[in-house]
Amino acid sequence: MTSLKHCPAPAKLNLFLHVNGRRPDGYHLLQTVFQMVDHGDSLDFTLRDDEQIVRVTELAGVPQECDLIIRAARLLQAEVQRRTGHLPRGVDIAINKVLPMGGGLGGGSSDAATTLMVLNHLWQAGLSRDELMAMGLPLGADIPFFIFGQTAFAEGVGEALQPVQAADCWYVVIEPGVEVPTAAIFSSEHLTRDTPPVIISDFSSYLENRNGLKEFGKNDLQQVATQLYPPVAEAVAWLAAYGDARMTGSGACVFCALASEAEAESVLKQVPAKWQAWKAKALHHHPLDAML
């Protein structure tokens, strides 16, 4: 096999996101539930006759050397060489970029995770799921989740993952048209950093007993993001008329859960034209999970 095309890199939503503290190195201690949805980027991989790794798609504002896709591919290529003594063939990588940057949807991390999974397969590298997760973590805290490949309760900086059940539902997601830099949110003096820790059974029990589709907990980053970026606040307020609307990740995208595709479609038709919006179904396993 020398190529794989249309490889999905799904978006993620943070069903809740609590900041429990801060480590001495400055990283924040988090608790969240990661939920994949069936909407995202897709990538094409074609092996080359040399050893170069090349992104053949231009991405505005993202030089190839800084792209997590390229960095992940080179990291895996070097690891394969270390294990076998041979540098595997290079690869051309094309990306159909759908997810917005600074949207809190994990787009760059998902792209990198897909790259690691697909190249591990194409190169017949034989790395395990846990090995790929460990390789991805230094590149981005969300990358291990996508390789983990299931709805997950996450702790630490987001790398300590346990599988968890979540609702089989549809989501409407609004892109408010602003890019929210993660660093600007986490460095804010107004960020709440002392939300009491929860345990996984708190989330599971709530899910079993909740009334309707009201989400568990809250997103501690939302208050800061909505103050700094009014379009995010406006999108939350608009979508709240249809459900428990909240921001995902550090923003800017806003979502709410609906019980059916028909309900999601109905809400989607009402979204003001100034916003990009889409509906998506909850995914309980990564589409590429069979590769691992």
Image (spheres, rainbow, N blue to C red):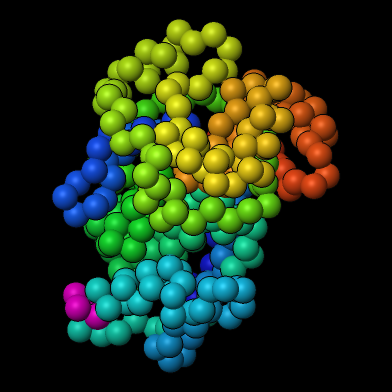
The x and y percentages for residue 157 are 28, 46
Q: Nearer the viewer, residue 67 or 1?
A: 67
Q: Position of residue 8 (x, y in %)?
A: 56, 55
**Residue at (37% x, 69% y) in the render:** 72
Q: Quadrant of residue 41?
A: bottom right
Please say whether residue 165 is visible from this viewpoint: yes
Can residue 285 be seen here? The reply is no
Q: Quadrant of residue 230?
A: top right
Going by the image, does 46 lie left or right of 238?
left
Q: Residue lying farthest front?
A: 189
- Image: 84 above or below 180: below
Question: Residue 208: where, in percent of width, then height?
Answer: 44, 11
| Magenta highlight on residue 141 | no
Q: Is residue 27 left or right of residue 252?
A: left
- In the rendered structure, the answer to whether residue 12 lies left or right of residue 94 reads left
Q: Which residues are magenta?
A: 80-84
In the image, 118 versus 263, the foreground residue is 263
